[in-house]
């Protein structure tokens, strides 16, 4: 680079001009003008554009440079500048030095400012460059400036100094941006979602993994969505119903049967097995002692489901797993224990057992039973408890090989969910296929999701979702379904979990609120577990409750009449001195 001489007081003075053009601004959704003006030095005039500073080794920048900022995030700021050349508008600078401080930066305190690491090498002149500064403190004012050098190690003066106060965490609203979905692989597709505001929270984060059709690129195919009325009374050895395709596909390849003999069949065993029982187990700190009560709430049987010294609690459900028309009792271990499933006859005889997840996955499991695919057998539905994810597994019994197999699996919530789940299964729209309903357990929010099985995609897809209680409630939710008003369509019943009052709420099959009541004093904060059973055989299910995590082991039966709930029965399932809470499951 040739030296340039300037006349000053009739003498020549030698100055080496480092022809670096450098400007700095904060990366905002819309870029604003930083500065426009003229610099004077040694008789040389340098015009400064709105985004690029002409910086020479002997040119001082004006002190009145202005920055215009319209947004920020709590722990990062993205800087943007136009890459300078090493010879005017051409070439490429050699090195950048970007620094920041919590007080204003100038040439005197430049060395005390914090240098940034991992800065990219300069791009060709004129290139828009960006760099995200991360690890900043929220609600703090920061100053930034940049220098550049050429290949001869000639450094520019500092650029304009930009400053901004990072946002407080409380005021940061995530702005999620997601990549396109991947191709459908192994019946799932994925994407990556990032918060452009970098708020440091996953609140409102879209799903990054969902189930999909293997041939979903064929968008011309109409997917049938059948909804059926309840079965009629059995007349002349047959019963009937009507089914409607809500998507109006004009095809009937997956239409459910509308007439059948009055026996176990298309309606599913849940509808045709005329057995009504109530299973009661200790909650998460109790032993493995299960008590089974008949329809009249008399003790039918009692037995230990696991070793007598087991003290993690037991979850249970009732269903016909092997298609013999007789209910089995299915149990799962409580929190912080191996995912051990056991199946008993109603007298306590052990028939089957297996691990629903790897045996070292010690978070316990929730269990449910329902016919999700219309094959006439109840599948076992399992979900992890506290500390586990939202990985639902549907496990079916192979009658020919006499063994259990994983039928389907899916994630009910985002992959980073670790609150544990309650799960139930029920045919909500009378189409012969049970939906799977899930809710966070004892430390989760009240976000209910409903999944249905699609015979076309052969997988589960989310059908609906709703909040059962106030958004900020974090005590978990218990679940049940039942036809409370005898209209032939099941309702969804929820109970507030531990730390919540004994608040029971009733929703229709689409999650719309219908009714509610308190099963005990509103001052009670042990949560309420819910189930249903047609106690009096009048065609309408009664709601049955128990204290979830503390309180006496009392079981209450509530009847719905004249648009209100009335306590109909009460009894102690265990010794009244037991105060660790109970779980209730009816059929």
Image (cartoon, rainbow, N blue to C red):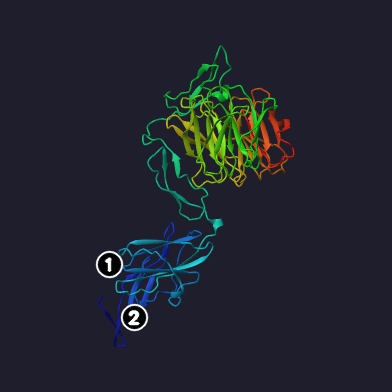
Disc 2 versus disc 1: nearer the observer:
1
Q: Position of residue 130 (x, y in %)?
A: 39, 61
Q: Which residue is mark 1?
A: 91
- Residue 42 disc label: 2
Image side of residue 552 versus residue 96, left or right: right
Q: Nearer the viewer, residue 43 or 216?
A: 216
Q: Residue at x 53, y 49 (%)?
A: 203
Q: Nearer the viewer, residue 276 or 121?
A: 276
Quarter containing the C terminus = top right
Q: Residues within 10 Å of mark 1 (few under 14, many from 20)?
A: some
Residue found farthest to the bottom: 10
Q: Residues within 10 Å of mark 2 (few under 14, many from 20)?
A: few
Q: Position of residue 490 (x, y in %)?
A: 59, 29
Q: Callout 2: helix, strand or loop?
A: loop
Query: What is the spatial separation of the Cα atoms under label 2 and label 1, in whole angstroms?
Result: 25 Å
Picture layout, residue 79 above or below residue 467: below
Cβ atoms at labels 2 and 1 below 8 Å apart: no
Judge whether residue 394 can be spotted in this image.
yes
Q: Callout 1: helix, strand or loop?
A: loop
Q: Residue at x 51, y 22 (%)?
A: 266
Q: Nearer the viewer, residue 262 or 205?
A: 262
């Amino acid at each position: 680079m040739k030296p340039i001489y300037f006349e000053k007081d009739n003498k020549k003075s030698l100055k080496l001009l480092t022809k670096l053009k450098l400007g700095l601004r904060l990366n905002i959704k819309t870029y604003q003008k930083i500065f426009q003006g003229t610099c004077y030095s040694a008789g040389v005039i340098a015009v400064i554009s709105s985004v690029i500073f002409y910086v020479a080794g002997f040119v001082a920048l004006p002190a009145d440079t202005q920055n215009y900022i319209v947004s920020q995030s709590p722990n990062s700021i993205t800087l943007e500048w136009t890459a300078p050349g090493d010879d005017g508008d051409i070439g490429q600078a050699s090195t950048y030095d970007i620094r920041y401080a919590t007080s204003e930066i100038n040439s005197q305190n430049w060395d005390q400012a914090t240098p940034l690491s991992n800065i990219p090498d300069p791009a060709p002149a004129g290139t828009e460059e960006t760099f995200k500064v991360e690890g900043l403190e929220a609600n703090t004012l920061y100053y930034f400036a940049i220098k550049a050098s050429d290949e001869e190690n000639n450094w520019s003066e500092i650029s304009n100094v930009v400053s901004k106060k990072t946002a407080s965490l409380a005021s940061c609203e995530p702005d999620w941006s997601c990549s396109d979905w991947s191709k459908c692989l192994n019946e799932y597709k994925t994407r990556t979602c990032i918060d452009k505001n970098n708020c440091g929270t996953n609140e409102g984060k879209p799903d990054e993994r969902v189930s999909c059709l293997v041939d979903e690129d064929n968008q011309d195919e109409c997917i049938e969505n059948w909804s059926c009325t309840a079965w009629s009374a059995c007349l002349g050895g047959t019963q009937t119903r009507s089914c409607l395709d809500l998507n109006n596909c004009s095809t009937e390849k997956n239409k459910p049967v509308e007439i059948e003999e009055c026996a176990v069949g298309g309606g599913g065993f849940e509808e045709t097995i005329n057995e009504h029982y109530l299973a009661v187990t200790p909650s998460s700190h109790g032993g493995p002692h299960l008590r089974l009560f008949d329809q009249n709430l008399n003790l039918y049987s009692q037995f230990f489901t696991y070793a007598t010294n087991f003290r993690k609690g037991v979850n249970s459900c009732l269903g016909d797993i092997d298609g013999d028309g007789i209910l089995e009792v299915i149990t799962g271990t409580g929190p912080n224990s191996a995912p051990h499933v056991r199946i008993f006859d109603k007298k306590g005889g052990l028939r089957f057992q297996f691990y629903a997840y790897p045996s070292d996955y010690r978070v316990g499991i929730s269990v449910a039973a329902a016919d999700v695919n219309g094959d006439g057998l109840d599948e076992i539905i399992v979900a992890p408890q506290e500390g586990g994810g939202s990985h639902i597994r549907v496990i079916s019994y192979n009658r020919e090989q006499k063994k259990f197999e994983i039928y389907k699996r899916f994630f009910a919530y985002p992959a980073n969910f670790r609150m544990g789940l309650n799960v139930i299964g029920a045919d909500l729209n009378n189409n012969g296929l049970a939906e799977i309903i899930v809710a966070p357990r004892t430390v989760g929010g009240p976000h209910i999701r409903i999944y249905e099985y699609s015979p076309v995609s052969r997988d589960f897809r989310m059908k609906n979702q709703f909040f059962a209680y106030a958004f900020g409630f974090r005590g978990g939710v218990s679940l049940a379904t039942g036809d409370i008003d005898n209209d032939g369509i099941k309702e969804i019943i929820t109970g507030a979990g531990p730390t919540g009052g004994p608040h029971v709420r009733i929703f229709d099959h689409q999650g719309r609120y219908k009714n509610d009541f308190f099963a005990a004093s509103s001052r009670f904060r042990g949560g309420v577990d819910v189930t249903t059973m047609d106690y009096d055989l009048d065609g309408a299910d009664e709601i049955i409750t128990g204290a979830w995590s503390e309180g006496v082991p009392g079981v209450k039966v509530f009847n719905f009449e004249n648009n209100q709930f009335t306590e109909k029965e009460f009894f102690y399932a265990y010794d009244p001195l037991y105060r660790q809470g109970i779980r209730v499951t009816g059929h």
